[in-house]
Image (tube, rainbow, N blue to C red):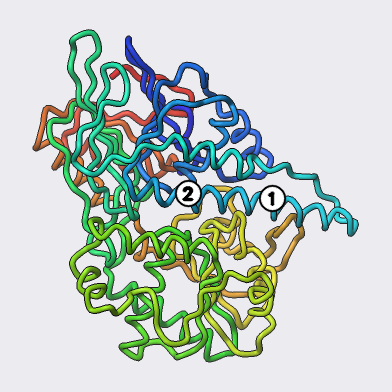
């Protein structure tokens, strides 16, 4: 367990057999700036020993350190679904651009006299291009040989476009084993994507545990909560800031706003998706209808874009982005990053966080020590670009729009895997300790005999 154990970021799991070494995921760690920078630079891997990388999906906490791996000399294959491959191109490029932009912004603050440390970007576009050349797209349900004695089959995880449950068939000195890794497991019933598929014949299940200690509220009450927060904020003349991952979360929010406006449940006001990356990612959705659910396909066939409506603007230009907060008209601003650790959302938070009329709506999981988590904790003072800011704006948390399965869905998934094969071991990862422990207790209560909750750096014999 190199990362993604005891935390929800920095996912990296190393599979060693007598014949090969395969890295599952290579994600960025997010949290305290100094700690995360150090861990992202060091990686904690013997790069020369890795025969192949297998990637479940394109979110940066799973894929964002791949260019660091390339900089350390890795030139082997990276296996992912075609949609994940296509999404990693704009997402990794955007990550490199944001790192350079944020570093330059901090340097300008240092020049103005702020007591801050210079930040060196983790990688540049050259490293991104080199990384993308290593990708091999593997469609869902096609078995692919990836290393000596190891084959992979991807199943739809229903989390984000292209997300996969990774099924590894391993032959270690004549002993066959099937390992199923959830990646991030999707929340059932949400629009856009199909529900998760089920692997068969698994001996070992490695499962995420992000929401292992809680249940999502029903979708109708979630939408009521979301609409109410928007309506109240616009009525008092404030702006609504929605930090959102450019992949899936932003599209989900746009689609939800479109439906709420059509039902006259939210006021008509300007809506900005202030993220060049989101526009690029949204274009990728149209290239992969195989991952979309039936309702979404029906809308696309009617030529009624689920990602557009009157009053919605996708913003790429920096100067237009700067002008959004200066407008006297209350608006809804959707911007990345989803955990408020970089990108344009930081500039909107800086402009609106001290305004008591405004609201920050949190629609995704916020990892420990991120700015997003500090907002969820409703701290009165937070730092943006290292500068303290007083939080006067309201903070509203809407969990029901999460793309992660909740406790009941994770237990149900594990039960279904057990019913379809000789499951003998469950390993819980990608969760903070309280969530992981709670899910472990639920699984043990459901008569799963071997449930492990490893820490970072721990080795497990399968």
Q: Quadrant of the C terminus?
A: top left
Q: Nearer the viewer, mark 1 or mark 2?
A: 2
Residue 326 disc label: none
Q: Which residue is mark 1?
A: 100
Q: Residues within 10 Å of mark 1 (few under 14, many from 20)?
A: some
Q: Position of residue 106 (x, y in %)?
A: 77, 54
Q: Is residue 458 visible?
A: yes
Question: Is 318 located above or below residue 323 in the figure?
Answer: above
- At a point 35% along the width and 83% down the height, the residue shown is 260
Question: Is 317 located above or below residue 413 in the figure?
Answer: below
Q: Earlier in the sequence, mark 1 or mark 2?
A: 2
Q: Position of residue 453 (x, y in %)?
A: 36, 31
Q: Is residue 186 left or right of residue 412?
A: right
Question: Is 351 located above or below residue 366 in the figure?
Answer: below
Q: Quadrant of the N terminus?
A: top left
Q: Which residue is mark 2?
A: 89
- At a point 36% along the width and 50% down the height, the residue shown is 211
Q: Position of residue 328 (x, y in %)?
A: 65, 89
In the picture, residue 25 is in which quadrant?
top left
- At a point 42% along the width and 47% down the height, the residue shown is 58
Q: Position of residue 311 (x, y in %)?
A: 47, 86
């Amino acid at each position: 367990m190199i990362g993604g154990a005891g935390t929800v970021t920095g996912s990296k799991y190393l599979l060693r057999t007598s014949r090969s070494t395969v890295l599952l995921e290579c994600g960025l760690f997010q949290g305290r700036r100094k700690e995360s920078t150090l861990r992202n630079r060091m990686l904690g891997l013997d790069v020369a020993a890795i025969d192949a990388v297998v990637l479940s999906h394109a979110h940066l906490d799973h894929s964002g350190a791949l260019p660091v791996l390339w900089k350390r000399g890795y030139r082997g294959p990276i296996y992912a679904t075609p949609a994940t491959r296509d999404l990693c191109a704009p997402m990794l490029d955007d990550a490199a651009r944001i790192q350079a932009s944020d570093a330059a912004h901090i340097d300008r603050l240092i020049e103005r006299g702020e007591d801050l440390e210079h930040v060196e970007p983790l990688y540049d576009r050259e490293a991104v291009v080199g990384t993308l050349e290593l990708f091999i797209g593997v469609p869902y349900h096609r078995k692919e040989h990836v290393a000596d004695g190891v084959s992979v089959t991807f199943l739809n995880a229903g989390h984000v476009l292209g997300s996969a449950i990774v099924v590894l068939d391993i032959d270690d000195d004549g002993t066959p084993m099937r390992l199923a890794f959830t990646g991030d497991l999707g929340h059932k019933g949400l629009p856009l994507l199909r529900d998760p598929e089920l692997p068969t014949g698994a001996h070992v299940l490695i499962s995420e545990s992000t929401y292992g200690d809680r249940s999502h509220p029903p979708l109708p009450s979630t939408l009521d909560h979301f609409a109410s927060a928007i309506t109240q904020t616009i009525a008092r003349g404030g702006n609504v800031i929605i930090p959102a991952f450019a992949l899936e979360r932003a599209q989900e929010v746009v689609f939800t706003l479109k439906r709420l406006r059509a039902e006259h449940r939210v006021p008509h006001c300007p809506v900005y998706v202030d993220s060049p990356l989101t526009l690029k990612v949204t274009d990728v959705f149209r290239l992969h209808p195989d991952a979309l659910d039936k309702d979404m396909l029906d809308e696309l066939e009617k030529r009624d874009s689920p990602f557009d409506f009157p009053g919605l603007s996708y913003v790429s230009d920096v100067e237009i982005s700067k002008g959004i907060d200066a407008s006297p008209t209350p608006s809804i601003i959707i911007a990345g990053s989803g955990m408020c650790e970089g990108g344009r959302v930081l500039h909107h938070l800086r402009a609106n966080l001290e305004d008591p009329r405004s609201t920050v709506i949190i629609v995704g999981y916020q990892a420990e020590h991120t700015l997003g988590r500090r907002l969820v904790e409703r701290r009165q003072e937070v730092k943006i670009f290292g500068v303290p800011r007083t939080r006067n704006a309201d903070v509203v948390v809407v969990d029901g729009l999460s793309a992660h399965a909740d406790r009941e869905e994770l237990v149900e998934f594990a039960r279904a895997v057990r019913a379809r094969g000789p499951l003998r071991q469950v390993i819980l990862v990608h969760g903070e300790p309280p969530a992981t422990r709670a899910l472990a207790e639920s699984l043990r209560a459901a008569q799963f005999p071997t449930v492990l909750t490893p820490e970072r750096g721990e080795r497990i014999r399968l």
